[in-house]
């Protein structure tokens, strides 16, 4: 009874541990990987920080609409009076002369005040600065969208790479079963004296080659899984795996087709280029504003104690600044900014054309990948039939073992080609959909 009790306890512990391990390991689908990468990837985190920094810049620029308030105070003590006066003394008595009277002030003093200046006109620099800050915030948001697209594309590539390697494992399983069946046939032929011991050794070498390929594929799966885990933000110390997902049949890409010009116009890169051109136009206005007069109105409260008595007063004032000597150099600065605007417009036009070329090229590559999948499917059909015929002919003694092994190798290569072609199609379809915002 005691023995059975301890066996039951051990079994319960093992089951509980296995259940805990199963609960601890999270299996990620493709959508879960994309969502985790958007949340945790370093590039996305930096992009969100850049958006936040641009927001703070816009809020800082908005404060320039309000008065500038400043306070200052000074206390001093000097080695002697800073203001000295000598007052002569005149008496109505002839011949009587007294020395002059010496008066000193401002050996110690205290001064302070508060002023507020409201900019009335600054050559539209404040308004233009706020527009530039708003453009910078919009540009940061567009860059974040670009980062999200790049992250999603990379996740898809890593994910389908793991799925493809698992597909190759299935191919190796099928090839291993075929090699075992061929070995059984060769062993029968050796016992019947039809085949030699050397034929059996060749089959064994083929099985060892398949085992070596399996080790390479399994190692590739482990490395790819680690790369994907790091990219989506899962700690490497935590167990990570993706869902068992087959590559499946592919569909014709025609349903995803979009005109290149239409797709290029809707891309975040195009909108980002628009913001750059608009920023260059605002920069011209900012440069012109620096060469225009600035007007400000202010009010202040002052206090001083320079003569041993408290004195305070309020005041209103106006300030006007005209950069007369800056007009000469300022005209060249404006022309420089105009040249930069033209450069930005030229770069925008060229970038849009290159985006149209990129989208068209991606579409051509997608069609080519689809055609490669169909060719690989037909190759599997031909290679499967070729292997079946060679196995039948080998049993009949009309072909050699080399022909059978070669036929098996061709079938394995055809299956691997289909796996790679399907993976390539999935990745290129994802890229095309991301480029066309679909």
Image: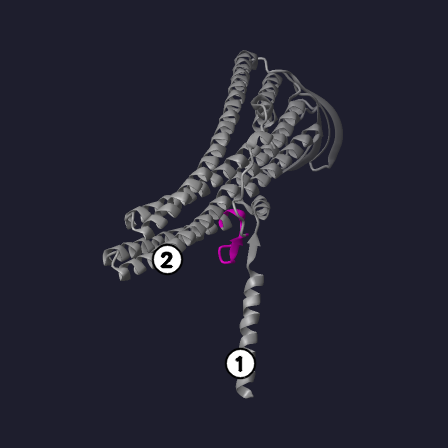
Q: Eyeballing the image, is 377 above or below 396?
A: above
Q: Eyeballing the image, is 410 above or below 324?
A: below
Query: Of residues 281 and 307, which is closer to you in this image?
Result: 281
> Along the polypeptide, which appears first: circle 2 or circle 1?
1
Where is residue 204 shown, x and y percent of the image?
Answer: 30, 57
Where is residue 32 shown, x and y percent of the image?
Answer: 59, 48
Where is residue 153 shown, x and y percent of the image?
Answer: 52, 38
Query: Of residues 157 and 236, which is closer to you in this image?
Result: 157
Q: Residue at x 65, y 29 (%)?
A: 134
Q: Residue at x 59, y 33 (%)?
A: 140
The residue at which mark 2 appears reads as: 180
Residue 82 in sight? no
Q: Is residue 242 magenta?
A: yes
Q: Taking 26 as reference, is 70 left or right?
A: right
Q: Eyeballing the image, is 99 above or below 154?
A: above
For residue 376, what is the image quadrant?
top left
Q: Is residue 98 magenta?
A: no
Q: Which residues are magenta?
A: 230-243
Q: Taking 82 as reference, is 314 left or right?
A: right
Q: SS for tag 1?
A: helix
For residue 138, what is the image quadrant?
top right
Image quarter hosting the N terminus: bottom right
Query: Of residues 165 and 13, which is closer to you in this image?
Result: 165
Please state the total of marks drawn on the protein image: 2
Q: Eyeballing the image, is 138 above or below 415?
A: above
Give the residue furthest to the front. Answer: 396
Q: Residues within 10 Å of mark 2 (few under 14, many from 20)?
A: some
Specify the label residue 7 is tagged with: 1
Q: Residue at x 65, y 34 (%)?
A: 60
Image quarter hosting the C terminus: top right
Q: CA distance from mark 2 to mark 1?
A: 39 Å
């Amino acid at each position: 009874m005691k023995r059975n009790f301890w066996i039951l306890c051990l079994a319960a512990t093992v089951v509980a541990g296995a259940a805990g391990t199963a609960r601890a390991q999270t299996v990620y689908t493709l959508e879960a990987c994309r969502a985790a990468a958007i949340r945790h990837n370093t590039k996305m985190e930096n992009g969100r920080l850049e958006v936040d920094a641009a927001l703070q810049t816009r809020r800082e620029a908005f404060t320039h609409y309000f008065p500038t308030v400043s306070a200052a105070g000074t206390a001093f003590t000097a080695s002697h009076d800073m203001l000295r006066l000598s007052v002569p003394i005149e008496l109505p008595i002839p011949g009587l002369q007294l020395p002059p009277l010496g008066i000193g002030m401002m050996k110690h003093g205290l001064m302070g005040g508060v002023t507020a200046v409201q900019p009335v006109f600054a050559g539209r620099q404040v308004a233009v600065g706020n527009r530039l800050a708003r453009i910078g915030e919009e540009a940061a948001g567009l860059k974040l969208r670009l980062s999200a697209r790049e992250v999603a594309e990379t996740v898809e590539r890593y994910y389908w790479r793991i799925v493809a390697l698992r597909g190759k494992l299935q191919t190796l399983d099928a090839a291993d079963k075929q090699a075992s069946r061929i070995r059984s046939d060769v062993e029968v032929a050796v016992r019947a004296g039809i085949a030699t011991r050397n034929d059996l050794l060749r089959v064994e070498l083929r099985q060892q080659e398949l085992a070596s390929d399996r080790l390479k594929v399994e190692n590739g799966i482990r490395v790819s899984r680690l790369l994907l885990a790091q990219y989506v933000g899962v700690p490497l110390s935590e167990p990570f795996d993706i869902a068992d997902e087959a590559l499946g049949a592919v569909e014709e890409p025609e349903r995803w087709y979009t005109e290149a010009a239409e797709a290029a116009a809707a891309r975040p890169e195009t909108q980002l280029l628009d913001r750059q051109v608009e920023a260059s136009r605002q920069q011209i206005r900012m440069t012109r504003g620096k060469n225009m007069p600035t007007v400000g109105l202010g009010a202040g409260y002052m206090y001083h104690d320079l003569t041993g008595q408290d004195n305070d007063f309020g005041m209103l004032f106006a300030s006007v600044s005209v950069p007369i000597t800056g007009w000469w150099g300022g005209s060249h600065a404006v022309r420089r900014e105009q040249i930069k605007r033209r450069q930005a417009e030229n770069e925008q036009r060229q970038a849009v054309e290159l985006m149209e070329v990129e989208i068209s090229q991606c579409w051509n590559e997608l069609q080519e990948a689809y055609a490669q999948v169909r060719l690989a499917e037909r190759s599997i059909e031909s290679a499967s039939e070729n292997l079946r015929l060679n196995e039948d002919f080998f049993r009949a003694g009309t072909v050699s073992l080399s022909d059978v092994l070669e036929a098996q190798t061709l079938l394995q290569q055809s299956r691997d080609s289909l796996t790679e072609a399907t993976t390539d199609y999935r990745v290129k379809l994802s890229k095309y959909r991301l480029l066309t915002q679909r």
